[in-house]
Amino acid sequence: MSPAIGSCATPIPAKAGIGLRFPHHQAVLDMRPDVAWMEVHTENYMGGGTALRYLDAIRRDVPISLHGVGLSLGSAEGLDPAHLQRIKAVAERIEPGLMSEHIAWSVIDRNYLADLLPLPMTEEALDVVCRHVDQMQSFLNRRILVENPSTYITFRHSTIPEWEFMAAVAARTGCGILCDVNNIYVSSQNHGWDASTYLASLPPAAIGEMHLAGHAVRQLADGRTLRIDDHGSSVIPEVWALYQEALARFGPVPTLIEWDNNIPPLETLLGEARRAASFIAVAEHEAEHADAA
Amino acid sequence: MPTLLEVQRAMCTSIVEHDPATIVDDLADGIGPDRLDIYRNTIFFGLTRALRLAFPAVERLVGAEFFEGAADIFIREHLPRAAYLDQYGGEFPEFLRRFPPAAGVPYLGDVAELEWAVNRALHAPDVKPLELKELAEVGPDNQGDVGFQPHPSVSLIRTEHLADDIWRAVLAGDDQALAAVDLGAGPVFLLVERAKGDVEVSRMQGTEWRFLNALCRGDSMLSAMDSAHGLDAASLLAQHLSANRFVGFRRQDGERGLSISEFKQ
Protein backbone atom coordinates (compact mmCIF):
# COMPACT_ATOMS: atom_id res chain seq x y z
CA MET A 1 0.00 0.00 0.00
CA SER A 2 1.32 3.43 -0.89
CA PRO A 3 1.93 5.87 1.94
CA ALA A 4 -0.96 8.17 2.79
CA ILE A 5 -0.75 11.53 1.06
CA GLY A 6 0.57 14.05 3.54
CA SER A 7 1.76 11.31 5.90
CA CYS A 8 5.05 13.16 6.39
CA ALA A 9 3.32 16.55 6.62
CA THR A 10 3.33 18.83 9.62
CA PRO A 11 -0.02 18.30 11.34
CA ILE A 12 -2.39 21.22 11.75
CA PRO A 13 -2.33 22.27 15.43
CA ALA A 14 -5.50 22.97 17.45
CA LYS A 15 -4.87 26.69 17.11
CA ALA A 16 -6.06 29.62 15.03
CA GLY A 17 -5.06 29.91 11.36
CA ILE A 18 -5.88 32.11 8.38
CA GLY A 19 -6.99 31.47 4.83
CA LEU A 20 -4.07 32.37 2.55
CA ARG A 21 -5.15 34.32 -0.53
CA PHE A 22 -3.09 35.63 -3.48
CA PRO A 23 -3.05 39.32 -2.40
CA HIS A 24 -1.25 38.29 0.81
CA HIS A 25 1.41 36.01 -0.71
CA GLN A 26 4.16 38.64 -0.68
CA ALA A 27 3.14 40.14 2.68
CA VAL A 28 3.28 36.70 4.33
CA LEU A 29 6.77 36.07 2.96
CA ASP A 30 7.95 39.54 4.03
CA MET A 31 6.36 39.59 7.49
CA ARG A 32 6.52 35.91 8.45
CA PRO A 33 3.48 36.49 10.66
CA ASP A 34 3.09 34.52 13.85
CA VAL A 35 0.18 32.32 12.80
CA ALA A 36 -0.11 28.62 13.64
CA TRP A 37 -1.26 27.38 10.21
CA MET A 38 -2.79 28.44 6.91
CA GLU A 39 -5.34 27.03 4.52
CA VAL A 40 -5.54 27.44 0.75
CA HIS A 41 -8.09 26.50 -1.90
CA THR A 42 -6.72 23.41 -3.63
CA GLU A 43 -8.04 24.59 -7.01
CA ASN A 44 -5.83 27.71 -6.92
CA TYR A 45 -2.64 25.67 -7.02
CA MET A 46 -3.34 23.15 -9.76
CA GLY A 47 -0.96 24.80 -12.21
CA GLY A 48 2.67 25.83 -11.86
CA GLY A 49 4.40 29.17 -11.93
CA THR A 50 4.17 32.01 -9.44
CA ALA A 51 1.30 30.84 -7.21
CA LEU A 52 2.93 27.50 -6.52
CA ARG A 53 6.33 29.12 -5.97
CA TYR A 54 4.85 31.30 -3.21
CA LEU A 55 3.10 28.37 -1.56
CA ASP A 56 6.28 26.28 -1.71
CA ALA A 57 8.15 29.06 0.08
CA ILE A 58 5.42 29.75 2.66
CA ARG A 59 4.88 26.11 3.57
CA ARG A 60 8.47 25.78 4.75
CA ASP A 61 7.44 27.85 7.80
CA VAL A 62 3.74 27.13 8.20
CA PRO A 63 1.66 23.93 8.13
CA ILE A 64 -0.82 24.03 5.24
CA SER A 65 -4.35 22.66 4.95
CA LEU A 66 -5.86 22.02 1.49
CA HIS A 67 -9.50 23.05 1.20
CA GLY A 68 -11.18 21.92 -2.02
CA VAL A 69 -14.08 23.77 -3.60
CA GLY A 70 -14.59 21.91 -6.88
CA LEU A 71 -14.83 18.14 -6.47
CA SER A 72 -18.62 18.22 -6.10
CA LEU A 73 -19.11 15.38 -3.62
CA GLY A 74 -22.88 15.64 -4.13
CA SER A 75 -22.96 15.18 -7.92
CA ALA A 76 -25.43 12.48 -8.95
CA GLU A 77 -23.32 11.70 -12.02
CA GLY A 78 -20.19 10.75 -10.04
CA LEU A 79 -16.83 12.41 -9.43
CA ASP A 80 -14.63 13.73 -12.22
CA PRO A 81 -11.59 11.42 -12.13
CA ALA A 82 -9.40 14.09 -13.74
CA HIS A 83 -10.24 16.50 -10.93
CA LEU A 84 -9.55 13.89 -8.30
CA GLN A 85 -6.17 13.33 -9.94
CA ARG A 86 -5.43 17.08 -9.92
CA ILE A 87 -6.24 17.20 -6.19
CA LYS A 88 -3.91 14.29 -5.56
CA ALA A 89 -1.10 15.98 -7.48
CA VAL A 90 -1.44 19.17 -5.41
CA ALA A 91 -1.49 17.10 -2.20
CA GLU A 92 1.65 15.21 -3.20
CA ARG A 93 3.42 18.50 -3.82
CA ILE A 94 2.14 20.46 -0.80
CA GLU A 95 1.98 17.66 1.82
CA PRO A 96 -1.00 19.18 3.65
CA GLY A 97 -1.74 18.57 7.31
CA LEU A 98 -5.47 18.41 6.56
CA MET A 99 -7.64 18.05 3.47
CA SER A 100 -11.29 19.00 3.22
CA GLU A 101 -14.25 19.34 0.84
CA HIS A 102 -17.90 20.40 1.04
CA ILE A 103 -21.31 18.83 1.43
CA ALA A 104 -22.55 20.42 -1.78
CA TRP A 105 -22.57 19.93 -5.54
CA SER A 106 -21.37 21.98 -8.49
CA VAL A 107 -21.02 19.63 -11.46
CA ILE A 108 -23.89 18.45 -13.68
CA ASP A 109 -23.55 16.96 -17.16
CA ARG A 110 -19.82 17.68 -16.75
CA ASN A 111 -20.49 21.41 -16.55
CA TYR A 112 -18.97 23.14 -13.54
CA LEU A 113 -21.29 25.66 -11.89
CA ALA A 114 -18.75 27.60 -9.89
CA ASP A 115 -20.53 27.65 -6.53
CA LEU A 116 -21.31 25.28 -3.67
CA LEU A 117 -24.90 24.38 -4.49
CA PRO A 118 -27.30 22.90 -1.93
CA LEU A 119 -28.35 19.26 -1.91
CA PRO A 120 -31.81 17.99 -1.12
CA MET A 121 -31.41 16.26 2.24
CA THR A 122 -32.58 12.80 1.12
CA GLU A 123 -31.44 9.20 1.57
CA GLU A 124 -30.40 9.20 -2.10
CA ALA A 125 -28.19 12.29 -1.64
CA LEU A 126 -26.72 10.78 1.54
CA ASP A 127 -25.81 7.59 -0.36
CA VAL A 128 -24.24 9.60 -3.18
CA VAL A 129 -22.19 11.77 -0.82
CA CYS A 130 -21.00 8.80 1.26
CA ARG A 131 -19.98 6.89 -1.88
CA HIS A 132 -17.94 9.88 -3.05
CA VAL A 133 -16.33 10.52 0.35
CA ASP A 134 -15.29 6.84 0.37
CA GLN A 135 -13.92 7.22 -3.15
CA MET A 136 -12.00 10.40 -2.29
CA GLN A 137 -10.55 8.94 0.92
CA SER A 138 -9.43 5.74 -0.73
CA PHE A 139 -8.00 7.56 -3.76
CA LEU A 140 -5.98 9.89 -1.53
CA ASN A 141 -5.39 7.16 1.03
CA ARG A 142 -6.17 9.53 3.88
CA ARG A 143 -9.05 10.79 5.98
CA ILE A 144 -10.73 13.96 4.81
CA LEU A 145 -13.01 16.49 6.49
CA VAL A 146 -16.35 17.55 5.02
CA GLU A 147 -17.78 21.01 5.61
CA ASN A 148 -21.42 21.84 6.35
CA PRO A 149 -22.85 24.25 3.74
CA SER A 150 -24.51 27.63 4.01
CA THR A 151 -27.79 27.54 2.09
CA TYR A 152 -30.45 29.93 0.81
CA ILE A 153 -33.04 27.40 -0.35
CA THR A 154 -34.46 24.14 0.96
CA PHE A 155 -36.21 21.41 -0.99
CA ARG A 156 -39.79 20.17 -0.65
CA HIS A 157 -38.73 16.52 -0.59
CA SER A 158 -35.91 16.78 1.98
CA THR A 159 -36.41 14.28 4.79
CA ILE A 160 -33.20 14.50 6.87
CA PRO A 161 -32.23 17.49 9.03
CA GLU A 162 -28.89 18.82 7.82
CA TRP A 163 -27.15 18.15 11.17
CA GLU A 164 -28.23 14.50 11.02
CA PHE A 165 -27.01 14.32 7.43
CA MET A 166 -23.57 15.62 8.50
CA ALA A 167 -23.34 13.18 11.40
CA ALA A 168 -24.41 10.29 9.16
CA VAL A 169 -21.71 11.05 6.56
CA ALA A 170 -19.06 11.01 9.29
CA ALA A 171 -20.43 7.83 10.88
CA ARG A 172 -20.72 5.91 7.60
CA THR A 173 -17.42 6.92 5.97
CA GLY A 174 -15.16 7.62 8.94
CA CYS A 175 -14.43 11.10 7.60
CA GLY A 176 -14.18 14.08 9.91
CA ILE A 177 -16.36 17.18 10.00
CA LEU A 178 -15.22 20.68 9.23
CA CYS A 179 -17.70 22.62 11.32
CA ASP A 180 -18.25 26.01 9.69
CA VAL A 181 -19.76 28.02 12.53
CA ASN A 182 -20.68 30.94 10.29
CA ASN A 183 -22.49 28.58 7.90
CA ILE A 184 -24.48 27.10 10.78
CA TYR A 185 -25.47 30.59 11.86
CA VAL A 186 -26.33 31.72 8.30
CA SER A 187 -28.41 28.62 7.47
CA SER A 188 -30.13 28.59 10.87
CA GLN A 189 -31.18 32.22 10.44
CA ASN A 190 -32.26 31.64 6.82
CA HIS A 191 -34.33 28.56 7.57
CA GLY A 192 -35.47 29.10 11.16
CA TRP A 193 -33.32 26.32 12.64
CA ASP A 194 -31.88 26.33 16.14
CA ALA A 195 -28.11 26.73 15.83
CA SER A 196 -27.49 25.25 19.29
CA THR A 197 -29.44 22.11 18.38
CA TYR A 198 -27.34 21.87 15.20
CA LEU A 199 -24.08 22.04 17.18
CA ALA A 200 -25.34 19.62 19.83
CA SER A 201 -26.19 17.06 17.13
CA LEU A 202 -22.67 16.89 15.69
CA PRO A 203 -20.39 14.14 17.06
CA PRO A 204 -17.55 15.91 18.97
CA ALA A 205 -15.00 13.21 18.13
CA ALA A 206 -15.48 13.83 14.39
CA ILE A 207 -14.85 17.59 14.49
CA GLY A 208 -11.44 18.13 12.90
CA GLU A 209 -11.58 21.83 12.12
CA MET A 210 -13.79 24.89 12.43
CA HIS A 211 -14.29 27.84 10.08
CA LEU A 212 -15.20 31.41 10.93
CA ALA A 213 -16.06 34.17 8.45
CA GLY A 214 -18.22 37.21 7.90
CA HIS A 215 -21.46 37.29 5.93
CA ALA A 216 -23.82 39.80 4.32
CA VAL A 217 -27.47 40.52 5.08
CA ARG A 218 -29.91 41.17 2.27
CA GLN A 219 -33.59 42.10 2.12
CA LEU A 220 -35.64 39.94 -0.29
CA ALA A 221 -38.58 41.09 -2.43
CA ASP A 222 -40.99 39.28 -0.10
CA GLY A 223 -39.71 41.33 2.83
CA ARG A 224 -37.76 38.50 4.40
CA THR A 225 -34.13 38.83 5.38
CA LEU A 226 -31.54 36.51 3.94
CA ARG A 227 -28.01 36.06 5.22
CA ILE A 228 -25.45 35.45 2.49
CA ASP A 229 -22.15 33.70 3.15
CA ASP A 230 -19.87 36.02 1.19
CA HIS A 231 -16.70 35.90 3.35
CA GLY A 232 -16.45 39.64 2.82
CA SER A 233 -16.31 41.15 6.32
CA SER A 234 -15.34 40.44 9.91
CA VAL A 235 -16.95 37.75 12.06
CA ILE A 236 -20.10 39.11 13.77
CA PRO A 237 -20.64 38.91 17.56
CA GLU A 238 -23.41 36.30 17.25
CA VAL A 239 -21.03 33.98 15.37
CA TRP A 240 -18.25 34.52 17.93
CA ALA A 241 -20.77 33.53 20.62
CA LEU A 242 -21.75 30.41 18.70
CA TYR A 243 -18.06 29.62 18.22
CA GLN A 244 -17.51 29.73 22.01
CA GLU A 245 -20.44 27.37 22.39
CA ALA A 246 -18.85 25.04 19.82
CA LEU A 247 -15.47 25.15 21.58
CA ALA A 248 -17.12 24.32 24.90
CA ARG A 249 -18.67 21.28 23.26
CA PHE A 250 -15.85 20.11 20.96
CA GLY A 251 -12.79 21.29 22.88
CA PRO A 252 -9.85 23.06 21.20
CA VAL A 253 -9.98 22.50 17.42
CA PRO A 254 -7.94 24.05 14.55
CA THR A 255 -9.92 27.15 13.61
CA LEU A 256 -9.64 29.14 10.41
CA ILE A 257 -10.51 32.75 9.58
CA GLU A 258 -11.78 32.87 5.98
CA TRP A 259 -11.96 36.10 4.00
CA ASP A 260 -12.47 35.92 0.21
CA ASN A 261 -14.12 39.16 -0.91
CA ASN A 262 -13.10 42.74 -0.05
CA ILE A 263 -9.89 41.15 1.22
CA PRO A 264 -8.47 43.38 3.99
CA PRO A 265 -4.82 43.97 4.94
CA LEU A 266 -3.12 40.89 6.35
CA GLU A 267 -3.04 42.52 9.80
CA THR A 268 -6.86 42.56 9.95
CA LEU A 269 -6.96 38.84 9.29
CA LEU A 270 -4.32 38.21 11.93
CA GLY A 271 -6.37 40.25 14.41
CA GLU A 272 -9.38 37.99 13.80
CA ALA A 273 -7.13 34.94 14.26
CA ARG A 274 -5.82 36.33 17.57
CA ARG A 275 -9.40 36.69 18.75
CA ALA A 276 -10.14 33.06 17.84
CA ALA A 277 -6.90 32.06 19.60
CA SER A 278 -8.03 33.75 22.80
CA PHE A 279 -11.23 31.68 22.80
CA ILE A 280 -9.25 28.51 22.07
CA ALA A 281 -7.02 29.30 25.08
CA VAL A 282 -10.12 29.45 27.28
CA ALA A 283 -11.27 26.09 25.92
CA GLU A 284 -7.81 24.60 26.60
CA HIS A 285 -7.96 25.88 30.15
CA GLU A 286 -11.40 24.39 30.66
CA ALA A 287 -10.30 21.08 29.16
CA GLU A 288 -7.38 20.94 31.60
CA HIS A 289 -9.72 21.68 34.49
CA ALA A 290 -12.06 18.94 33.36
CA ASP A 291 -9.11 16.51 33.19
CA ALA A 292 -7.94 17.50 36.67
CA ALA A 293 -11.39 17.14 38.18
CA MET B 1 -40.17 12.57 -5.75
CA PRO B 2 -37.53 13.83 -8.19
CA THR B 3 -34.19 12.02 -8.32
CA LEU B 4 -31.01 13.86 -7.39
CA LEU B 5 -29.99 13.95 -11.06
CA GLU B 6 -33.34 15.53 -11.99
CA VAL B 7 -33.00 18.16 -9.27
CA GLN B 8 -29.48 19.02 -10.35
CA ARG B 9 -30.44 19.30 -14.03
CA ALA B 10 -33.45 21.46 -13.15
CA MET B 11 -31.37 23.73 -10.94
CA CYS B 12 -28.70 24.09 -13.59
CA THR B 13 -31.27 25.09 -16.21
CA SER B 14 -32.98 27.55 -13.90
CA ILE B 15 -29.69 29.16 -12.93
CA VAL B 16 -28.14 29.32 -16.39
CA GLU B 17 -31.33 30.38 -18.20
CA HIS B 18 -32.25 32.71 -15.35
CA ASP B 19 -35.71 31.15 -15.23
CA PRO B 20 -36.95 29.54 -11.99
CA ALA B 21 -39.73 27.57 -13.74
CA THR B 22 -37.88 24.26 -13.88
CA ILE B 23 -37.01 24.14 -10.17
CA VAL B 24 -39.83 26.05 -8.47
CA ASP B 25 -41.95 22.94 -7.77
CA ASP B 26 -39.05 21.29 -5.94
CA LEU B 27 -38.54 24.18 -3.51
CA ALA B 28 -39.96 24.04 0.01
CA ASP B 29 -42.95 26.22 0.91
CA GLY B 30 -42.05 29.82 1.55
CA ILE B 31 -38.82 29.64 -0.45
CA GLY B 32 -39.14 32.36 -3.10
CA PRO B 33 -37.49 31.46 -6.41
CA ASP B 34 -35.62 34.79 -6.32
CA ARG B 35 -33.29 33.10 -3.83
CA LEU B 36 -31.82 31.21 -6.81
CA ASP B 37 -30.51 34.56 -8.02
CA ILE B 38 -27.95 34.45 -5.23
CA TYR B 39 -26.48 31.26 -6.67
CA ARG B 40 -26.67 32.66 -10.20
CA ASN B 41 -24.94 35.86 -9.15
CA THR B 42 -22.16 33.99 -7.37
CA ILE B 43 -21.55 31.69 -10.35
CA PHE B 44 -21.65 34.40 -13.00
CA PHE B 45 -19.66 36.82 -10.86
CA GLY B 46 -16.98 34.18 -10.22
CA LEU B 47 -16.74 33.09 -13.86
CA THR B 48 -16.71 36.71 -15.09
CA ARG B 49 -13.88 37.39 -12.63
CA ALA B 50 -11.97 34.41 -14.05
CA LEU B 51 -12.39 35.83 -17.58
CA ARG B 52 -11.44 39.31 -16.39
CA LEU B 53 -8.23 37.94 -14.86
CA ALA B 54 -7.34 36.15 -18.10
CA PHE B 55 -8.37 38.96 -20.50
CA PRO B 56 -7.49 42.29 -18.84
CA ALA B 57 -6.56 44.06 -22.10
CA VAL B 58 -9.80 42.94 -23.76
CA GLU B 59 -11.72 44.43 -20.85
CA ARG B 60 -9.88 47.74 -21.13
CA LEU B 61 -10.48 47.87 -24.88
CA VAL B 62 -14.25 47.39 -24.64
CA GLY B 63 -14.98 48.76 -21.15
CA ALA B 64 -16.24 46.96 -18.05
CA GLU B 65 -19.93 47.10 -18.94
CA PHE B 66 -19.49 45.68 -22.44
CA PHE B 67 -17.14 43.02 -21.08
CA GLU B 68 -19.64 41.90 -18.45
CA GLY B 69 -22.41 41.73 -21.06
CA ALA B 70 -20.25 39.67 -23.40
CA ALA B 71 -19.11 37.45 -20.52
CA ASP B 72 -22.70 36.78 -19.47
CA ILE B 73 -23.57 35.47 -22.95
CA PHE B 74 -20.30 33.56 -23.25
CA ILE B 75 -20.77 31.86 -19.87
CA ARG B 76 -24.26 30.66 -20.80
CA GLU B 77 -22.90 29.13 -24.01
CA HIS B 78 -19.62 27.82 -22.55
CA LEU B 79 -19.89 26.64 -18.97
CA PRO B 80 -16.53 25.45 -17.61
CA ARG B 81 -15.86 21.77 -18.28
CA ALA B 82 -13.62 21.41 -15.23
CA ALA B 83 -13.52 22.81 -11.71
CA TYR B 84 -10.20 24.39 -12.57
CA LEU B 85 -10.86 27.97 -13.54
CA ASP B 86 -7.28 28.83 -14.54
CA GLN B 87 -8.16 26.83 -17.66
CA TYR B 88 -11.49 28.59 -18.25
CA GLY B 89 -11.93 30.87 -21.24
CA GLY B 90 -10.11 29.13 -24.09
CA GLU B 91 -13.12 29.65 -26.39
CA PHE B 92 -13.46 33.34 -25.53
CA PRO B 93 -11.21 34.66 -28.35
CA GLU B 94 -13.22 32.79 -30.99
CA PHE B 95 -16.45 33.90 -29.31
CA LEU B 96 -15.37 37.55 -29.52
CA ARG B 97 -14.43 37.18 -33.19
CA ARG B 98 -17.99 36.06 -33.93
CA PHE B 99 -19.69 38.43 -31.48
CA PRO B 100 -21.48 41.01 -33.68
CA PRO B 101 -21.42 43.87 -31.10
CA ALA B 102 -17.61 43.58 -31.04
CA ALA B 103 -17.26 43.88 -34.83
CA GLY B 104 -16.18 47.52 -34.48
CA VAL B 105 -12.93 46.40 -32.82
CA PRO B 106 -11.43 44.20 -35.54
CA TYR B 107 -8.31 43.32 -33.53
CA LEU B 108 -10.22 42.30 -30.37
CA GLY B 109 -10.07 38.57 -31.15
CA ASP B 110 -6.32 38.80 -31.85
CA VAL B 111 -5.66 40.50 -28.51
CA ALA B 112 -7.84 37.91 -26.77
CA GLU B 113 -5.92 35.09 -28.45
CA LEU B 114 -2.65 36.57 -27.21
CA GLU B 115 -4.06 36.99 -23.70
CA TRP B 116 -5.22 33.38 -23.66
CA ALA B 117 -1.69 32.25 -24.56
CA VAL B 118 -0.32 34.47 -21.79
CA ASN B 119 -2.82 32.99 -19.33
CA ARG B 120 -1.80 29.47 -20.36
CA ALA B 121 1.84 30.34 -19.85
CA LEU B 122 1.14 31.84 -16.41
CA HIS B 123 -0.59 28.71 -15.13
CA ALA B 124 1.21 25.95 -17.03
CA PRO B 125 2.56 23.21 -14.78
CA ASP B 126 6.21 23.22 -13.80
CA VAL B 127 7.92 20.58 -15.95
CA LYS B 128 11.59 19.75 -16.03
CA PRO B 129 13.04 20.87 -19.37
CA LEU B 130 14.79 18.52 -21.76
CA GLU B 131 18.56 18.75 -21.63
CA LEU B 132 20.86 18.55 -24.59
CA LYS B 133 22.76 15.59 -23.10
CA GLU B 134 19.54 13.53 -23.01
CA LEU B 135 19.42 13.85 -26.79
CA ALA B 136 22.96 12.49 -27.04
CA GLU B 137 21.72 8.94 -26.61
CA VAL B 138 20.13 9.24 -30.04
CA GLY B 139 22.78 8.36 -32.58
CA PRO B 140 23.60 10.94 -35.28
CA ASP B 141 21.93 8.80 -37.95
CA ASN B 142 18.60 8.84 -36.13
CA GLN B 143 18.44 12.47 -35.07
CA GLY B 144 16.26 13.38 -38.02
CA ASP B 145 13.56 11.08 -36.67
CA VAL B 146 13.31 12.82 -33.32
CA GLY B 147 10.07 14.66 -32.51
CA PHE B 148 9.79 17.01 -29.55
CA GLN B 149 7.25 17.72 -26.84
CA PRO B 150 7.01 21.45 -26.09
CA HIS B 151 6.97 22.91 -22.59
CA PRO B 152 3.29 23.38 -21.61
CA SER B 153 3.84 27.13 -21.22
CA VAL B 154 4.83 27.55 -24.88
CA SER B 155 2.29 28.87 -27.40
CA LEU B 156 2.92 29.92 -30.96
CA ILE B 157 0.31 32.23 -32.40
CA ARG B 158 -0.08 34.15 -35.62
CA THR B 159 -2.37 37.18 -35.58
CA GLU B 160 -3.59 39.35 -38.45
CA HIS B 161 -3.09 42.56 -36.46
CA LEU B 162 -0.15 43.65 -34.34
CA ALA B 163 -1.66 42.02 -31.27
CA ASP B 164 1.54 42.33 -29.21
CA ASP B 165 1.89 46.10 -29.75
CA ILE B 166 -1.80 46.68 -29.03
CA TRP B 167 -1.70 44.47 -25.93
CA ARG B 168 1.35 46.22 -24.47
CA ALA B 169 -0.05 49.70 -25.16
CA VAL B 170 -3.40 48.84 -23.59
CA LEU B 171 -1.91 47.30 -20.45
CA ALA B 172 0.48 50.24 -20.07
CA GLY B 173 -2.45 52.64 -20.51
CA ASP B 174 -0.42 54.31 -23.27
CA ASP B 175 -3.02 55.91 -25.58
CA GLN B 176 -0.33 57.46 -27.77
CA ALA B 177 1.29 54.10 -28.45
CA LEU B 178 -2.11 52.58 -29.11
CA ALA B 179 -2.99 55.32 -31.59
CA ALA B 180 0.36 54.79 -33.32
CA VAL B 181 -0.29 51.10 -34.05
CA ASP B 182 -0.66 50.57 -37.78
CA LEU B 183 -3.87 48.55 -38.16
CA GLY B 184 -2.91 47.66 -41.71
CA ALA B 185 0.38 46.07 -40.67
CA GLY B 186 0.64 42.41 -39.92
CA PRO B 187 0.42 39.54 -39.61
CA VAL B 188 2.76 38.93 -36.68
CA PHE B 189 4.25 35.65 -35.55
CA LEU B 190 4.43 35.42 -31.77
CA LEU B 191 6.04 33.14 -29.23
CA VAL B 192 4.54 33.16 -25.73
CA GLU B 193 6.31 31.30 -22.94
CA ARG B 194 7.12 31.37 -19.26
CA ALA B 195 10.86 31.83 -18.95
CA LYS B 196 12.48 31.99 -15.51
CA GLY B 197 9.11 32.60 -13.86
CA ASP B 198 7.93 35.49 -16.03
CA VAL B 199 5.73 35.32 -19.09
CA GLU B 200 7.40 36.64 -22.21
CA VAL B 201 5.86 37.55 -25.53
CA SER B 202 8.29 37.81 -28.40
CA ARG B 203 7.86 38.45 -32.08
CA MET B 204 9.51 36.01 -34.48
CA GLN B 205 10.49 36.04 -38.10
CA GLY B 206 7.93 34.00 -40.08
CA THR B 207 10.21 31.19 -41.25
CA GLU B 208 11.71 30.67 -37.79
CA TRP B 209 8.22 30.69 -36.30
CA ARG B 210 7.08 28.00 -38.78
CA PHE B 211 10.09 25.84 -37.92
CA LEU B 212 9.46 26.11 -34.16
CA ASN B 213 5.74 25.59 -34.73
CA ALA B 214 6.47 22.36 -36.60
CA LEU B 215 8.76 21.17 -33.79
CA CYS B 216 6.18 22.04 -31.11
CA ARG B 217 3.54 20.15 -33.10
CA GLY B 218 5.72 17.05 -32.71
CA ASP B 219 6.88 16.87 -36.33
CA SER B 220 10.17 15.03 -36.77
CA MET B 221 13.32 17.11 -37.19
CA LEU B 222 13.50 16.11 -40.84
CA SER B 223 9.99 17.19 -41.61
CA ALA B 224 10.33 20.40 -39.57
CA MET B 225 13.42 21.27 -41.58
CA ASP B 226 11.27 21.17 -44.71
CA SER B 227 9.68 24.37 -43.45
CA ALA B 228 13.04 25.90 -42.57
CA HIS B 229 14.41 26.86 -45.97
CA GLY B 230 17.58 28.84 -45.64
CA LEU B 231 17.71 28.49 -41.87
CA ASP B 232 20.49 27.05 -39.76
CA ALA B 233 18.19 24.47 -38.23
CA ALA B 234 20.80 22.91 -35.97
CA SER B 235 21.72 26.16 -34.28
CA LEU B 236 18.05 27.19 -33.96
CA LEU B 237 17.29 23.86 -32.32
CA ALA B 238 20.17 24.39 -29.91
CA GLN B 239 18.75 27.82 -29.02
CA HIS B 240 15.29 26.38 -28.36
CA LEU B 241 16.75 23.64 -26.20
CA SER B 242 18.82 26.05 -24.15
CA ALA B 243 15.75 28.26 -23.72
CA ASN B 244 13.97 25.23 -22.14
CA ARG B 245 11.23 25.13 -24.76
CA PHE B 246 11.07 21.33 -24.87
CA VAL B 247 10.40 18.84 -22.11
CA GLY B 248 10.65 15.52 -23.91
CA PHE B 249 11.33 13.84 -27.20
CA ARG B 250 10.25 10.79 -29.13
CA ARG B 251 12.16 8.77 -31.67
CA GLN B 252 10.25 7.71 -34.68
CA ASP B 253 11.00 4.89 -37.05
CA GLY B 254 11.65 6.92 -40.16
CA GLU B 255 10.70 4.10 -42.53
CA ARG B 256 7.38 3.19 -41.07
CA GLY B 257 6.66 6.50 -39.36
CA LEU B 258 5.69 4.72 -36.17
CA SER B 259 6.55 5.76 -32.69
CA ILE B 260 8.99 3.28 -31.19
CA SER B 261 9.19 4.80 -27.75
CA GLU B 262 6.93 6.97 -25.69
CA PHE B 263 7.81 10.57 -24.97
CA LYS B 264 10.80 10.56 -22.73
CA GLN B 265 10.54 12.90 -19.74
Image: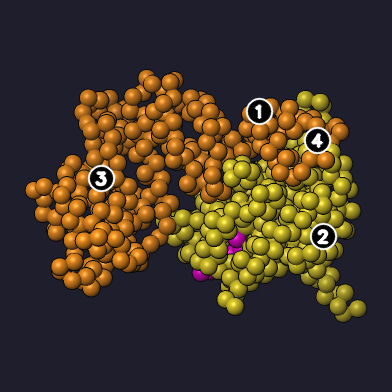
- Label 1: how many Cα within 10 Å (few below 14, some 14–19, many 20+): some
Q: Nearer the viewer, mark 3 or mark 2?
A: 2
- Which amino acid type is marked by label 1? His
CA gap between label 1 and label 3 equals 43 Å
What label does residue B215 carry, if any? none
Which amino acid type is shown beneath numbered disc 2?
Ala
Name the residue rendered at 85%, 55% in the picture. A164
Residue B141 seen: yes
- The residue shown at (79%, 40%) is B2
Q: Secondary structure at mark 2?
A: helix
Q: Which residue position holds label 4?
A: B27
Q: Are marks 4 and 2 in contact (CB under 8 Å)?
A: no
Judging by the rendered image, the residue that carries numbered circle 1 is B18
- Which quadrant of the figure has residue A186? top right
Query: Residue A50, position in %: x, y?
Result: 43, 55
Q: A79 or B104: which is nearer to us?
A: A79
Mark closer to the observer (4, 2): 4
Could you tell me how far apart the alpha carbons at marks 3 and 2 are, in whole angstroms? 56 Å
Side of A26 where B1 appears, left or right: right
Determine the colour of chain A: yellow
Span shown in magenta: A60-66
Please, which residue is most extreme toward the front here? B256
Instruction: List the residue tagged with mark 3.
Output: B202
Real-space Cα separation, disc 1 to disc 4, in angstroms: 16 Å
- Residue type indicated by callout 3: Ser
Pick whichever, A287 or B3, lies toward us.
B3
